[in-house]
Image (cartoon, helix red, strand yellow):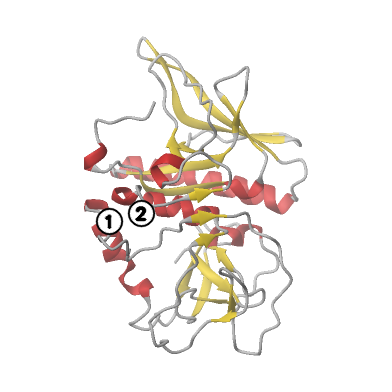
Amino acid sequence: MFRATNIHTGQDVDAEDLWSMEPIDPDGFTCPDCGSKVYPTSYRPENLRRAHFAAKPKCPPWCPSNGEADLLKRARAESLSAEDGSFPGYMPAGFRLPVETAPADAAAGASVIEGEGKGRRAPSAPPEQGARQRPRVTTSFRDICRAYLNFPNDRHRELHFLDLYGTTYDEVIWRLRTKQDHLIRYPIPHLFHGPIGWRAPEVTDEHALIEMDVKEWHDGKPGRPYQVKVLWSDWTQRQRSALLREVETASNEAKDLKKAGSKDRSLLFFVGRQEKDDDASFVVTERKLICCLTGFDGRPAASRGKSKP
């Protein structure tokens, strides 16, 4: 489980946020769908795996998290969108930047969940209409990126992301590409993604420079790769360390995936502007609009052969 509710703030948090949180209450998280107790795992510096949450004991049978693995397996092979517009998975229709809030005023033993508004309590027993309905507009950048990876045959579904171009996942989110011997100029801002390189980021007090595994090729030899410059002069040391930890984890996952022959990829997602005088360089200025995820980057069968410019 990669998302949980923080009982002290009433907000849903990503597991990767554990890398920048201090202090961490091991008993301070619940399942965002059913309210069961979950525990933060693999978030300490010595842990090699990606941070996540574990439910011990498991969530009740009616909780959607129990059927998630089977649902995602189906999603790789077919569209899950029904004719009436309903959808069994979680694909938010919009994104807004999160706002830092003070801890919620909740009764002892109860948790509150961030959604369209604050203050909804996580149920300890199944509500009349099943598990808690997640908000259509999320404040989690990773929610958007994970939905894109998890449901490749449903990227036609609605998505409104800040002021970016497009109204569907497939229009808003673009994979970085090259035209063999040169990189591409993107005149319209998008949420970009691509395989992350294996080289450690270059770090200064002003920025971190992350290399992508998307590059020019000249006569069979690699040329310039895309690079993402993250401006972090106003970040805390813990926030900087969290990003570097996330990049390192993704790079290690990429090596393991290649060794195993997996079709999954370790990807960097970001919203940034391409430098006017350098097609290879993108600049990210917002800390909440960059992340690394591992998942299926394939394209649905219906769209194969149709490439974006």
Q: Position of residue 127 (x, y in %)?
A: 42, 87
Density class for disc 2 (Cα within 10 Å; few <14, some 14-19, many ≥20) is many
Give the left or right position of residue 188, taking residue 237 as reference.
Answer: left
Q: Earlier in the sequence, mark 1 or mark 2?
A: 1
- Residue hosting label 2: 150
Residue 92 on image: x %, y %: 46, 58
The answer to whether 168 is drawn above or below residue 58 in the figure is above
Q: In the picture, residue 234 is in which quadrant?
A: top right
Tell me where residue 112 appears, x and y as whole percent: 60, 79
| Other-residue count near label 1 (Cα within 10 Å), few / some / many at <14 / 14–19 / ≥20 | many
> Left or right: 58 with respect to 238?
left
Tell me the element at label 1.
helix
From this view, report whether residue 144 is shown above or below residue 163. Answer: below
SS class, disc 2 = helix
Q: CA distance from mark 1 to mark 2?
A: 7 Å
Assign the C terminus to one quadrant of the image: top left
**In this picture, is 196 found above or below 107?**
above
- The answer to whether the residue labelled 1 contacts the one labelled 2, judged by CB atoms less than 8 Å apart, is yes
Q: Quadrant of residue 182?
A: top left
Residue at 42%, 83% in the rendered image: 57
Residue 81 sits in which quadrant? bottom left
What's the residue type where badge 1 is placed?
Ala
| Front-most of residues 201 and 305 | 305
Residue 200: x percent and y percent?
A: 57, 36
Which dot marks residue 75? Answer: 1
Check the image and name the residue furthest to the front: 84
Which corner quadrant holds the N terminus? Answer: bottom left
User: Image point 65% across, 58% down: which residue?
Assistant: 20
Name the residue rendered at 48%, 88% in the picture.
124
